[in-house]
Amino acid sequence: MSAREHAGDEGGHGHKFPAEKWERLVSPERQSLLVPDRLLEQFGVHEGMTVADLGAGPGFFTFPLATRVGAAGLVYATDISPEMLSVLESRGLPPQVRPILAGESRIPIPDGIVDLAFLAFVLHELVHPEAFLHEVRRILRPTGRLVVLEWQRREEEMGPPMHERLSQVRSAALLAAGGFIVSEDGEANASQYYLVARPERPEPAHP
């Protein structure tokens, strides 16, 4: 049985944030809640890295990622919505950002070139998280990391409804099913948590 079948009523409903409401994703309130540069420093994003901002939307994290990796780095900004990518591009991308139209089962980035994959408030939207996470694992270097940000599973005025939220335990289980081992976790703020994971190494072949 797949992780999706075990999901119960937690997330995985495929509801995507509407592109026409993109301005809410870059609002001053969201900036003050998440403080992106502080988080990226915490996760060790630095000059020269290759980063994949998966589900980049209008670029809330894309632009600060580009600043931190600098001209020597690269940011792949992917989204499944052509409308969101159009908004992203209209905001004036620096040369180190490459917008890419992607799907849940295919991320058009070459194998093993990404130092850090950033998945901010996307995991709970996925219909097929295992397939998506296997793709994330494919594009990561063996030493690469995946950072996941998600909403705490409780009723709140802001954020998605309760039935779309994933508990931290559930998110960790999905990552495990996708071939990842969680190495770090914590609270980004009172409403949101993070997980840092690394690709699980395959078992050595027996002679």
Image (tube, rainbow, N blue to C red):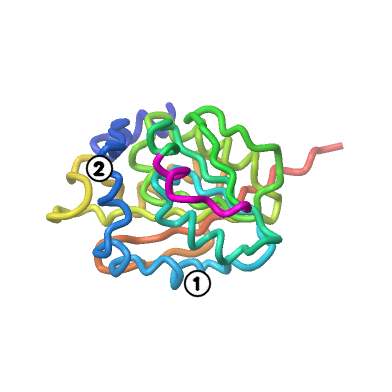
Residue 80 pos. (x, y %): 44, 32
SS category of the residue bearing label 1: helix
Label 1 Cα crowd, 10 Å radius (few <14 / some 14-19 / many 20+)? few
Q: Residue 84's x, y, as percent? A: 39, 38
Mark 2, other Cα within 10 Å: few <14 / some 14–19 / many ≥20: few
State whether the magenta stretch is mostly helix, strand or loop.
loop
Residue 130, magenta (yes or no): no
Foreground: 120 or 8? 120
Residue at x 48%, y 34% (from the top left corner): 130
In the image as oriented, which residue stretches furthest toward the right? 207
The stretch in magenta equals: 87-96
Q: Quadrant of the N terminus?
A: top left
Nearer the observer, 200 or 85: 85
Q: Which residue is mark 1?
A: 42
Q: Residue at x 22, y 46 (%)?
A: 160
Could you tell which of marks 1 and 2 lies nearer the N-terminus?
2
Q: Which mark is residue 116?
A: none
Query: Residue shown at 49%/62% (left/top)?
Result: 64
Number of marks in the rendered image: 2
48 and 145: which one is in front? 48
Residue 119 as seen in the image, left or right of residue 207: left
| CB-based contact (under 8 Å), mark 1 and mark 2 | no
Give the percent coordinates (x, y) of residue 28. 27, 64
Q: Where is residue 42 shown, x and y percent of the image?
A: 50, 72
Q: Secondary structure at mark 2?
A: helix
The disc labelled 1 sits on which kind of residue?
Gln
Q: Which mark is residue 21?
A: 2
**Residue 89 included in the magenta stretch of the image:** yes
Left or right of residue 205: residue 90? left
| 140, above or below 27, in the image | above
Residue at position x 29%, y 39% in the image: 17
Mark 2 residue type: Lys
